Image: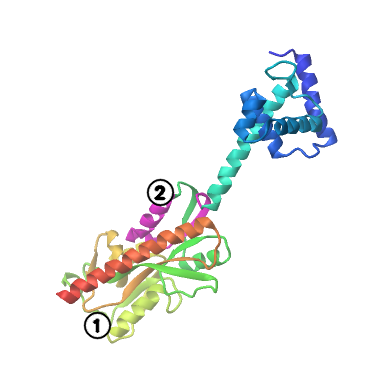
Amino acid sequence: MLPPRECKKARLQLDAPKRRGFGNIELRHLRYFMAIAEEMSFARAAERLGVAQPGLSQQIKILEDLLEVRLFDRSRRKPSFTLAGELFYEETRKIITQLDVATQIARRAARGEVGRLAVGYVGSAAYTGMLTRVIGEFRENHPSVELHISELEMLRQLDAIAEGRMDIGFIRPPAPLPRNIDTIPILFEDLDIALNTRHPAADQAEVDLKDLAGEDFIIPVHSSQISFHHHTTVACQKAGFQPRFGPHGRDFMTIASMVSIGLGVALVPRSTRCIQLPSLVYRPIKGQHVKAELAVAFRRGDHSPIVRSFIVITRHHMQQMTEAGRTVSGSSDKS
């Protein structure tokens, strides 16, 4: 343990350049110093660094001149620390270690391995399993990325993404997209009709939609021709009638509850069957080919490596969905 007076004197020597300015101390000076400090040999340090020994000695002399202290005692065959050199080594080691950490963080951030990603989703996206599947794969490949996930109404998601307050959204098209937003479809679902168990059609294996022309159709709170307002309108028009809209629900959980107490019927994505309530049944629609889309929304031209990595995973799932569709179509053609 160094005497307190000598430690104070050495630290005053090291602090002196702070008052006068460090001049032109460069990172290479610190790395050269660290190599000698760890080898305690100018020859071995020069070999390790791949530089000539005279040049290394000159650089250390420049560093000492800039600091206005002697870092090494060269009076013996093997160099040793001066007190100032020993204290300088402890502080420099922290600098080099922190610089290496900062370098790795910067490189990982550039590869999209660290950072923050804000993801929004409509509630029904969770029912499909695609939300957990896509985010799960992203999480597995990018464990250090901080994820912020929140359920949010679709149009509010799109506004947040357009304004840069959110990065990714899981939405149910069709919807009016801001000019800087693109989408990637990742799932197309069949529609079912949700009925109260007391409804006459509840006992049927399939329901002909035209038999429900006089019913109140419950839809989510959307403007005209958006998402399930659009799907319900198109499906009913294909069945030969214009739907009569009843009460609106905030989400499909609310809509399922409203159907179960007899407030009307509802066209829902097939994944909604995971919501099981008393007095509620789901039935396929006879001869109906309207599909409900689930898509991922993002800012066009977003340069964030994290967002780009997420989009790569999303496109992979889109490709899988497309290939699965072709397989089903091919099987149907052969049959």
| The C terminus sits in image quarter | bottom left
Colour setting: rainbow
On residue 210, which mark appears? 1
Magenta range is 112-141
Q: Nearer the viewer, residue 122 or 40?
A: 40
Q: Is residue 185 magenta?
A: no
The local crowd at label 2, few if under 14, some if 14 to 19, many if 20 or more residues have their Cα within 10 Å, is: few
Residue at 72% over, 24% down: 85
Q: Is residue 186 above or below residue 149?
A: below
Name which residue type carries label 1: Lys
> SS of the residue at dot 2?
helix
Task: Give the labeled residue for mark 2.
Answer: 140
Name which residue type carries label 2: Glu
Q: Residue 320 occupies which quadrant of the picture?
A: bottom left
Q: Position of residue 325 (x, y in %)?
A: 28, 70
Residue at 48% over, 70% down: 182
